[in-house]
Image (cartoon, rainbow, N blue to C red):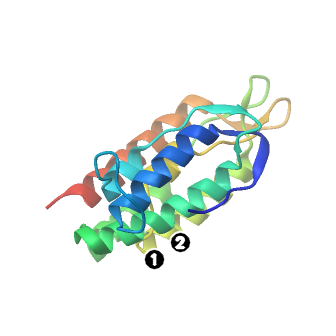
Amino acid sequence: MPHFPRAGRGYDRDEVDAFVARIEGTLGRAPLYAPPVTADGVTTVRFRRTLRGYQMNAVDEALDGYIHELEDKDGATRMRSGEVDRLVGLVRNVRFGTTRLKVGYDEREVDAFLDGTITALRENRARASQVKNAVFATSRIRPGYRQPDVDAFLERLASEIARLRSRR
């Protein structure tokens, strides 16, 4: 079982440990004491955030690796080239409203996240959980993207990724 670095604020350690133990059991590396986990189950899992929890990025990266292993084990569906192109176009062409006096998301962070999402889509490793769990710094006074616009788009993108990955 992997060991994750701790952070001042991160994922609840007990929840992560229990879930990773289920994954390891599903993959046959450890005894399985709970229902097996599917790749979709890993994609949709959410952990509470607590003080002195596990570093979120480290856990998310490990979960991505587990998703690939579970997909290989379960024969889960990969997105087709046309579907990937459509989602890449959706991400490339999105436009968000901006705000200057109200709190908004840092434009550079959102843009960098979307660039990374395009790369992940092209490499067929984009996961709905990564999109849903995206966290951005906020900005005030300098321009920022309107939070409701970004949140609505990410929710739509995550549901599209989940739908395409779960079809049989």
| Residue under label 1 | 123
Q: Does the residue at mark 2 contact the one at mark 1 (Cβ under 8 Å)?
A: yes
Q: CA distance from mark 2 to mark 1?
A: 6 Å
Image-quadrant location for residue 123 = bottom left
Q: Is residue 102 left or right of residue 110?
A: right
The numbered disc on residue 103 is none
Q: Is residue 12 left or right of residue 7?
A: left
- Residue 157 or 30: which is nearer the viewer? 30
Mark 1 secondary-structure assignment: loop
| Residue under label 2 | 119
Image-quadrant location for residue 86 = bottom left
Residues packed near mark 1 inside 10 Å, few (<14), some (14 to 19) or many (20 plus): few
Q: Amino acid at mark 2?
A: Thr
Q: Amino acid at mark 1?
A: Glu
- Residue 144 or 112: which is nearer the viewer? 112
- Residue pictured at 46% horizontal, 47% vertical: 19
- Residue 70 or 113: which is nearer the viewer? 70
Q: Is residue 121 left or right of residue 83?
A: right
- Residue pictured at 40% horizontal, 70% vertical: 68
Q: Position of residue 59 (x, y in %)?
A: 60, 54
Q: Position of residue 31 (x, y in %)?
A: 38, 58
- Residue 37 or 151: which is nearer the viewer? 37
Mark 2 secondary-structure assignment: helix
Q: Position of residue 87 (x, y in %)?
A: 38, 61
